[in-house]
Amino acid sequence: MKYISRPQKQKGISLFVVIVIVLLSTLLSLWASRSALFNELIVGNDADYQRAFEAAQALIQDAEFDIRGSRPDGTLCVPVAGTPAICRVPDASNTVWFPNEDKEVTELLHELTAESTGCRNGICLKRTGNQDFWADTATLTSMIAAGVGARYGQYTGAEKGNVSNTILNNATAGNGGWYWVEVMPYDPSAGNGAIITSGANSNLLLNIVPRVVYRITAVARGLKPGTQVVLQSTFVRQKKKD
């Protein structure tokens, strides 16, 4: 008699192994994609912050040129016809400028008291109360309104087209960067006094006319929502020697 062998039934173990391998491969792919996306977000946020930081530094420098009345290349700021705001030439559209004499300081401060924000065209009274106005949304909104803060190159003639930082080129409402300069007079008796007296030869003598110290605040907003950099510096304009 001949025996006929019948094929054994499949147990399904191979299919199970394949399904497990496919599932693990899918999970690994999802993890890799999620990690890549997370790293991209970190790199993008850091790049946006660095871009905003560089813009704030440029705004601080532009404010110093504005105070000195010079162009970005260091030459004397000479106004161009049709642009009275540049170099802050006094006229009907430009009613505040940085004082050159002590008597002009009083006139400037009186002019600024008429403003609800205490600022006009980037020149401000010394702030009272909370100094970090950028931390309050309502206050910051009023400070970045047109005619209150100053934009990059607005009063120095700095060429925006030659600046690669897109934040400085952005002048739309609520975007880009601004600076404000607080005019802070001090006691005339301290004008040429020694403000550092730790040693006989360590006195720091200041020769300032007018007797004013300036505090510059720059705010730059990044291209991504929530990115904002604030920088502050103190600037003293030295009197030129005769």
Image: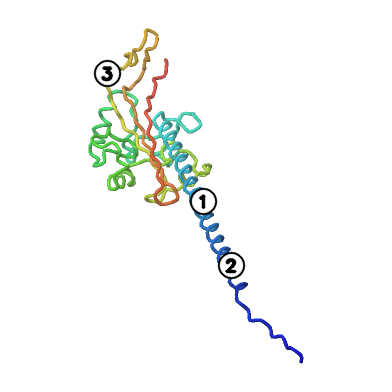
Residue visible at 71% across and 85% down in the picture: 5
For marks 2 and 1, give the one nearer the viewer.
2
Q: Amino acid at mark 3?
A: Pro
State whether residue 241 is above or below residue 64: above
Pinpoint residue 106: horizontal percent, then vertical percent: 25, 28
- The kind of secondary structure element at disc 3 is helix
- Drawn side of residue 242 relative to residue 32, left or right: left
Q: Answer with the quarter of the image where residue 197 lies.
A: top left
| Residue position for label 1 | 39
| Residue position for label 3 | 188
- The kind of secondary structure element at disc 1 is helix
Q: What quarter of the picture does the C terminus occupy?
A: top left
Pinpoint residue 65: horizontal percent, then vertical percent: 43, 31
Foreground of the two, 26 or 61: 26
For marks 2 and 3, give the one nearer the viewer.
2
Q: Amino acid at mark 2?
A: Val
CA distance for labels 2 and 1: 26 Å
Number of the label disc, if any, that sits on residue 22? 2
Q: Looking at the image, is mark 2 or mark 1 earlier in the sequence? A: 2
User: Quick one: label 3, few (<14), some, or many (20+) residues within 10 Å?
Assistant: few
Residue visible at 26% across and 30% down in the picture: 107
